[in-house]
Amino acid sequence: MVTVLTADNPMVIDCLDGGGVIAYPTEGVMGIGCDPFNEDAVEKIRQLKARPKVQGMICVASSWDQCAHWVMPVSEARMAEIEISWPGPVTWVFEASELAPEAVCAEDGTVAIRVSAHPVVQQLCDAFSGALVSTSANARSEAPCLDATAVAQLWGDQLCAIVLGDLQTPGQASTIKEAATGKLFRC
């Protein structure tokens, strides 16, 4: 059975450093994630979710500094709108720079980033010293898991660890917008 841990347990970071996939609470649903620079770990998430490679993966950070270098510049007005929405449940899709982890970028050359207000996500990103992949914990076309028990039942031993914590707004996925235009993709 999968190990259930608190965010401050060093085994969680050992898991991520070793290429493992973890589950953890986010603003609205349980998420699964890994080191965005570990292509094998990102591929494992794609397989768990049956997610096509053409789609990118959202990454979460505790601060913009953890991933600002992954994106091409946007206008000052757009950046002001983005910064007002963070930390919080808004994901922005940027044109990726050469420094973005290729495994999480969409086929169109974009990367999706959210600076999270969730204390567990912030703690994980700070302890890991960087952003993490964050995609909903669910099989393709199924509803996302809303607690650790549901994740354990879905994927059990396929995860390295499940991190405990509460959802802030259960069942509500993050809003997704395009950074260059503000176009709404999902609300």
Image (tube, rainbow, N blue to C red):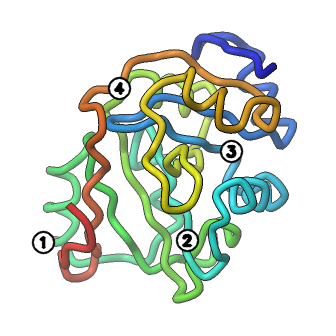
**Tags 2 and 3 in contact by the CB under 8 Å rule?**
no
| Percent position of residue 108, x then y | 52, 89
Question: Is 131 on the left-hand or right-hand side of 147?
Answer: right
Q: Residues within 10 Å of mark 3 (few under 14, many from 20)?
A: many
Residue carrying label 3: 34
* CA gap, disc 2 and disc 3: 14 Å
Whichever of labels 3 and 4 marks the residue nearer the N terminus, that label is 3
Q: Quadrant of the C terminus?
A: bottom left
- Looking at this view, name the residue that lies furthest to the bottom: 108
* CA gap, disc 3 and disc 1: 32 Å
* CA gap, disc 2 and disc 1: 25 Å
Front position among marks 3 and 4: 4
Residue 77 is labelled as 1
Three-letter code for the amino acid on which mark 3 is drawn: Cys
Front position among marks 2 and 1: 2
Q: Is residue 110 depicted above or below 15 in this figure?
A: below
Question: Is 36 on the left-hand or right-hand side of 44?
Answer: left
